[in-house]
Image (cartoon, grey):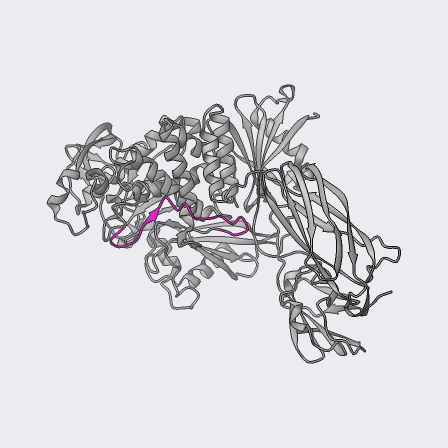
Amino acid sequence: MRLQIAVSLLLLSTLSNAHAAESRLVKIQFLPAQRSSSPEQTAREFITAEAKSLGINSDSLVLIQNQSSLTANHLIFQQTIGDVPVENATFTVSVAKKNGAVFQYYNSALNSLKADAFKAKVSVEQAYDAAWAYVGVQERLYQAPKAKLLYKQTAKNLRLIYQIELSPTNPYGAFAVDVDASTGEILGVKDLRLTEKVIALPKTFGTKRPTIDRKQAFQAYKDAAPTHFVRAGETKSGNATVFDPDPKTFLNTDNLKDSSKASDFDAAYVERILPDLNFANGTYTLSGPWVKLIDFDPPKAAVSTTKNGLWSFKRGQSGFNDAMTYFHLDQSQRYIQSLGFKEENGIQFGPIEVDADGVNGDDNSYFQWSTNQLSFGHGCVDDNEDADVILHEYGHALHFSINANWGGGDSGAMGEGFGDYWAASYSYSTDNGKDFQSDIVYNWDAGTCWDGRVLNAIDARYDHSKSYYAHSGIAGGFQSDELWSTPLFQAHKQLRAKGIPREEIDTIVLEAQFGLGSGLKMRDMATSIVATAQRLYEKGPHAQVFRDRFVEHGILVLPRPILTAELGAVTDEDGTFDPGESVIFPLTIKNTGDQLAEAVTVEVTTGDEFVTQVQGSFTPGNLAAGKETSLNLGLTVSETAPCGHSIELQIRLKDKTGKEWTVTTKVQLGRALKTAISSELNKPIPDKNAEGLLASVAIDSSAKVSSAFNVAVNIKHTYRADLKIVLTAPSGKKLTLHDRSGYSEDDIIGVYPTTLTPKDPLSGLIGENLNGNWSLNVADGATGDTGTLVSWGIEDVSGYECR
């Protein structure tokens, strides 16, 4: 079936791995007559039609989920090799419920499925043994061990691995260990928990210390594994004494501390209903349709129960922490459902398991995405005395419920920032939330034992070329998390001030997360939020307010003209600009931006003493995005100007708005006399050999190295990141041109420093003697990929000739 489509690019994100495809969120409108009978059929037809242009093999994509949101069905396809999934490689097609048309897709599938192995040579048991030894397990497991076979993206290609999950009590934590399925080599390890505060991996990893017996530990866990069984009974409501949201905000005071007298908190306690508790055999348990309190995480601590359905506890008692946790999580889920996210559109639509006294007793909390569990620690102010902490951690659970491939890109900072936003959205809705420290999150938990975070990092700025990880410091003294939470929450406050209800704002932020995948950047998610706001509330201020806040931080960049200038070669009859001549240079003005430049003016000036006339004032008028115009620049130079003299020109460009661009360029008097030598070798570069291949050329010249010095190379190689290239001058001075960069790209062909960028600047050679032997050493530092030094050469300017 032929499809007629109109495409407008909304979002572009590039994964950090060179083998990864570009991730795109593209809005596509299909004509009504071209709709298919079902979302799945529509998605499959779209993939078939677009696979070639996207460079992916549609046969490698397997439908794993038809996810529903308020406005669309999101068909998620997993990329596989055989039956083995490729980690974080998915293709999601979003089909609008309103008209049955595809309106966006998100692609994190790979263009190349080059793998180092297609069959495991290491058994699962051997992989478990390797991971067990690497972690150095000393004591029992508190969660079930798991193993899964998958392909993992590496710098070179795909590697078949076992991902082993181990959760020992010593060293305490939940870890995923990647084991090469061909060699048993440990490729990496990560913590499976998203923690409120940073936890470093144990330094004992990989130290080969003695461990307890793995098979016995596995059997011991199996024999003692809790079933977390709750006897089915009636559903009844209970009541609890809680903080809502926290004692400081509720009492509108900053005077409370963890060490304050118990009586100082009396006025902060409120009574709240605990709906839909399980009641069996005369006992109420904190287990309901949306929250289930269990004891899975150290330390061992039984969950509180009551006979009368009343949790009338105070801070310092475990029953209080239990009730706080159940109430705020249950209330948040019911709020989400009130927005329409329920049943097939549900987010965390089911009971999430929670340990209200876990994290090994540490002052920390986490969400573990591999098991969909929450755990809250005690210490200083107990984390679950503050609704901000509870809702922040639930924010992580919401992310992963919507996007199971959440990870990579800026997802670390965005995950933490969204958690802070979700907590602040609720606190701001409470009685004193607008007035008491509204721009601070964790008002109660933070302050004594840790600093907490802010929601008004207005001066924080985004750099799209960087990756923003969780809890990392950024310029200005801010945290990466605050760079994302600030525009979200400031937009929330601004919209609330305009009379927009909280419900509409939160609906936008949640709905915008559907239909995406791994490798998201802040710019991607911001674009999705603005587009979702426009789609849901077309006539409201929602989209504009979000857009303005993202632009304020540089996360989004508004369409704008960008003017550049390029000077061509002189049009003189002999092709040179000599002293005493008047010549014409072609001057090309380009608009490389994405918006019309109106009423463009161009002014060329110079302060050079030998230039007697410049004909360089132009008014080319309007210049559309992507277009260019050609002008003729006239220059006259004095007869007394020395041959080889360099003239610096300033080209000033201006548009109707007053925006200015300045381009500095140089023109040379006379014809350059070049010294050049090259060598054709076609010699193989030794594989994984530190000595490498040495090639030399000899130059006979009395000149010194000038700023025009350059080195041409032609190296054929299947993996340029294996290579190190060092240039040695006759004096023995060495410069590194290339040092194992470029990921998996092939070949190094070009000229340093014009088309290739040297690691060490060639300016370090200026003034050296050109005369003598120059050598180039090319070394391959890794096995597998090989290559050839085809040729190389040196060129410089030794003088100038004028008429």
580 horizontally vs 242: left or right = right
593 relative to 74, above or below = below
33 horizontally vs 676: left or right = left
Q: Between 237 and 491, which is closer to the camera in this rendering?
A: 491
Residue 457 is covered by the magenta coloring: yes
Magenta stretch, main secondary structure, is: loop
Stretch of the chain drawn in magenta = 447-467
Residue 191 place in picture, x, y as percent? 41, 54
Q: Between 525 and 318, which is closer to the camera in this rendering?
A: 525
Identify the image quadrant of residue 54. Answer: top right
Q: Is residue 351 visible?
A: yes
Residue 97 is covered by the magenta coloring: no
Q: Quadrant of the N terminus?
A: top right
77 horizontally vs 565: left or right = left
Identify the image quadrant of residue 346. Answer: top left
Q: Is residue 404 visible?
A: no
171 relative to 633, above or below = below
Residue drawn at point x = 61 percent, y = 52 percent = 18
Q: Between 350 and 770, which is closer to the camera in this rendering?
A: 770
Count of all numbered marks drawn on residues in the image: 0
For this orientation, the residue located farthest to the right is: 573
Residue drawn at point x = 36 percent, y = 38 percent = 422
Residue drawn at point x = 84 percent, y = 66 percent = 802
Residue drawn at point x = 63 percent, y = 53 percent = 115
For this orientation, the residue located farthest to the left is: 263
Q: Quadrant of the C terminus?
A: bottom right
Residue 658 place in picture, x, y as percent? 59, 41
Residue 22 place in picture, x, y as percent? 60, 44
Residue 135 place in picture, x, y as percent? 41, 61
